[in-house]
Image: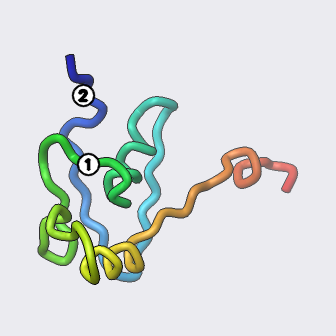
Amino acid sequence: GKMRALSDITFNLHRGRALAVVGESGSGKSTIAKIIAKMYKLSAGRILYRGHDLEEFNKGTALLDYRQSVQMVWQDPFGSLNPTH
């Protein structure tokens, strides 16, 4: 059967702001990021970007504009959380 990776996720992110997704290992942080980056497809629900459903950005200029506006910054936890740095 299908495994549910995420359930009832809601957040709003406004221009000029950053979002940090934190949680224990296996909690779905990378899955959320990959869905927002359109690396994974949603099986249910929707994501709105500037009032438009993310599924509208499938190819061409709309997808290119989206990918230029929305990007992930992967963090190295050992380098960024190391108290000796």
Crowdedness near tag 1: few (<14), some (14–19) or many (≥20) residues, C-alpha within 10 Å:
few
Q: Residue 41: image x %, image y %?
A: 26, 48
Numbered circles on residues, count: 2
Q: What residue did someone put label 2 on?
A: 4
Q: What residue did someone put label 1 on?
A: 41
Q: Is residue 63 above or below residue 26?
A: below
Badge 2 element: loop
Quarter location, residue 65:
bottom left
Left or right for 82, reference 26: right
Q: Residue 75: image x %, image y %?
A: 62, 54
Quarter location, residue 64:
bottom left
Crowdedness near tag 2: few (<14), some (14–19) or many (≥20) residues, C-alpha within 10 Å:
few
Q: Is residue 73 above or below residue 22?
A: below
Q: Amino acid at mark 2?
A: Arg
Q: Residue 1: image x %, image y %?
A: 20, 16
Residue at 74% across, 45% down: 78
Please state which of residues 5 and 66 is positioned toward the viewer in this rendering: 66
Q: Is residue 64 above or below residue 40?
A: below
Badge 1 element: loop
Q: Amino acid at mark 1?
A: Lys
Q: Residue 61: image x %, image y %?
A: 28, 83
Q: Which of the two discs, 2 and 1, sits closer to the camera?
A: 1
Residue at 33% across, 48% down: 40
